Image: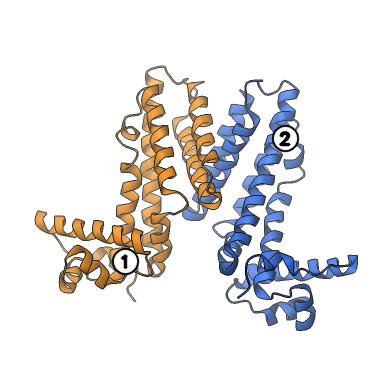
Chain colours: A blue, B orange
Amino acid sequence: MCDPGSVQSRTPKLTAKGRATRERIVAGAAAEFRARGVVATTLDDICRATATSKSQLFHYFPDGREQLLHAVAQHEADRVLLDQEPFLSDLTSWAAWDAWRDAVVARYREQGTSCPLGVLTTSLTRSTPASQEVTARLLEQWQRKITDGIVAMREQGAIAADVEPEQTGAALLAGIQGGVSILMQTGRLTHLEAALDVGIAALRG
Amino acid sequence: MCDPGSVQSRTPKLTAKGRATRERIVAGAAAEFRARGVVATTLDDICRATATSKSQLFHYFPDGREQLLHAVAQHEADRVLLDQEPFLSDLTSWAAWDAWRDAVVARYREQGTSCPLGVLTTSLTRSTPASQEVTARLLEQWQRKITDGIVAMREQGAIAADVEPEQTGAALLAGIQGGVSILMQTGRLTHLEAALDVGIAALRG
């Protein structure tokens, strides 16, 4: 058993080349987990898929599987936001909002009823705080970017001055999360689309 | 192993007294599952807690544990809606909408980061369709009641004629689901409250 705190503390200091190798292992592991499932994928599978020796793997992830899972969860969380770019970081025109809406819907249409990040965070059984931290950070960054967009549009006068950016951003993020959760339970995109369309229409006023 | 279809088909025909006994077992089992956890609760625990013999239990639930879990999941799903009454079924004034909003927030504040229904549906491993059916039916009934409220308010002229009840109801339900999911991940009610407050404010126009 590793205690939750150790996952972070035992990460070695890395050179640029070391960081690149670590990132290559994480990306390869993410692909293996997506293809085979988390439970069915062994560290040997990941070594084979990424052309890494077991001792190299333990150099980058001294705490083993749990620490690798945590890194892959973080990688999948980053990908959730990356898939919404370049629109999410530049919600400064209605065209950008519409393009962002379409990017979010397309991303989750492709992902369907599976949830690579959810599978990973529920697999992090030995370090629930680490899993909660990944999710909390993702939600916080996501909401920050939506809120920044609302602030920018308000400054332009495109969104009414009485719209409260933090609260409205939180409501829009909740709608997206709920839409994705209903998609995973029912296979239908209707609620995600409704949340985005009604939410953005309300911003337009 | 029982196949998913058998869960429904082997339910015996019951008299009024039989239905009352069955309901008593289901309510008792729900309380045991909530208190001890689904995995830790045995059929013997449920017999003891509900003063029922094992043969009586199998009379009402011939397929055993899986069928009982399904009945308890349905019971918890019904309770989600009941906890929002009498407001949810009568959203015909802004006072009712506000009281409903408060009832939803209070319900989930009390429930916190646990989710009795979610624990049950993820425990129904051998009959995923049965679990999906419980969730899908809950979402459908919930959305129907919200949409009925929007239609009623539109007929009174309190909600603008260009508000599309089905789509707006779907968006509001998505916001609630996302707010609850964020509450379970972070322990914070902020997003649930934002989804309800922003959603209802948009309806008011």
**Residue type of the residue flagged with mark 1:** Gly
Nearest the eye: B172 or B94 = B94
Q: Residue furthest right?
A: A16
* Position of B41 relative to A110 (above/below): below
On screen, residue B35 versus residue A162, left or right, reads left
* x then y, percent, for residue A91: 73, 35
- Labels 2 and 1 positioned on one and the same chain: no
Q: Picture coordinates of residue A46 (x, y %)? A: 71, 77
Q: Report whether residue A189 is seen.
A: no
Q: Is residue B85 above or below residue B161?
A: below
Q: Which residue is mark 1?
A: B5
Q: Is residue B185 visible?
A: yes
- Which is more toward the observer, A39 or A112? A39
Q: Residue at x 74, y 79 (%)?
A: A47
Crowdedness near tag 1: few (<14), some (14–19) or many (≥20) residues, C-alpha within 10 Å: few
Measuring from the top left, give residue B46's x and y in whole percent.
25, 67
Q: Mark 1 falls on what kind of element?
A: loop
Question: Which quadrant of the structure image shows residue A19?
Answer: bottom right
Question: Splitting the image into 4 quarters, where does residue A61 fall?
Answer: bottom right
Which residue is rendered at x = 79% and y = 77% of the image? A59
| Kind of residue sitting beneath label 2 | Asp
- Distance from the alpha carbon under mark 2 to that under mark 1: 50 Å
- The chain under label 2 reads A
Mark 2 secondary-structure assignment = helix
Residue bearing mark 2: A148
Q: Residues within 10 Å of mark 2 (few under 14, many from 20)?
A: some
Asked if residue B97 is positioned above or below residue B31 in the image, the reply reads: above
In the displayed structure image, the side of residue A151 where residue B156 appears, left or right: left
Q: Position of residue B147 (x, y in %)?
A: 40, 33
